[in-house]
Amino acid sequence: MADKRERERKTNFQTRINGCMRQMAEILYQIKGPPNHNTAEADADAILRPLMEFLDGNLSIFADICEKTVLKRILKDLWRIVLSSLEKTIVLPQSNDSLGAQLLTAAKGLSNLKGGGEAKTLTPKQCIIIDAGLETIKQYFHAGGNGLKKAFVEKSPELASLRYALSLYSQSTDAFIKTFVTTQHSQVDESEVVRAEFPVGVGVHTSWKTHPEVFSVLNESAGGGSYGTSMYVY
């Protein structure tokens, strides 16, 4: 019975937090202009408002009715859900755990930045705002030592994944594709390999039969040869 209630609570948290992230995304996408570190914290506070209102309202209730050990468990659940939802809803909204889908997301992002696609991608200014917001979220959950331990926060896989996703926006075309392949090459079926070669000699392998759309978008992102992309099956 307790396990069922916990699952229901997590599901409810996930649904509510996903809604907060969609509201945050709408605010974030309206922020334009060049990067500005001086305004990043204020901008982050603005986009975080829906999330913070949800967290404040719920955690104040749990703090009154839950034992400390239960409250810590709820905090850990919320931390994981918040970071995961932030990554999947705002930073890489089309990504999932598969290599092909991640490549497709990144490739669509490149196409959009070049004016040829429709995918939502973050501008350098928006990335700085997300970075500032992430620091605020970390401080909130640490709560000056009364919340989650810093070691738990800094070493959590959800934080590492989110930081990795954000780092893709600062990498060159060749670099981030090479990074995907290097870290996830074990997922590739060698019998369905496609090779993409770039001027700097980067070799990219992924599943052609499973994810042919990746290569179509990559070709679009190359802008008719501006990256000198060539692909062939072997």
Image (cartoon, helix red, strand yellow):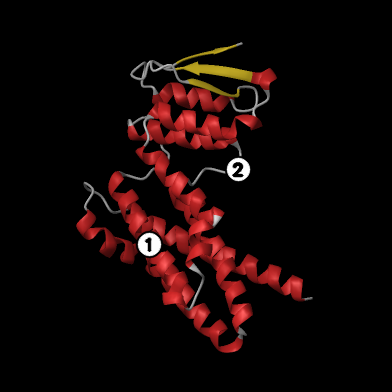
How far from the left and from the top, in percent, is residue 122? 36, 45
Q: Position of residue 215 (x, y in %)?
A: 51, 23
Q: Quadrant of the C terminus?
A: top right
SS of the residue under disc 2 = loop
Residue 66 percent across, percent down from the top left: 61, 85
Compared across the picture, whether 78 is left or right of 128 comes to right
Q: What crowding class fits label 1: few (fewer than 14 Cα within 10 Å), some (14-19), or many (20 or more)?
A: few
The x, y position of residue 43, in whole percent, is 28, 61
**SS under mark 1:** helix
* Horizontal arrangement in the rendering, residue 77 relative to residue 201 (left or right): right
**Image quarter for residue 24?**
bottom left
Please identify the quarter of the rendering in which residue 185 is found.
Answer: top right
Q: Which residue is mark 2?
A: 97
Q: Is residue 118 visible?
A: yes
Name which residue type carries label 2. Answer: Asp
In the rendered image, the quadrant that contains the N terminus is bottom right
Q: Is 6 situated left or right of 213 in this image?
A: right
Categorize mark 2 by other alpha carbons within 10 Å: few (<14), some (14-19), many (20+): few
Q: How far, Cα to Cα, is label 1 from label 2?
A: 25 Å
65 or 113, nearer to the observer: 65
Query: Residue 135, labelled with which disc?
Result: 1
Q: Is residue 59 above or below residue 22?
A: below
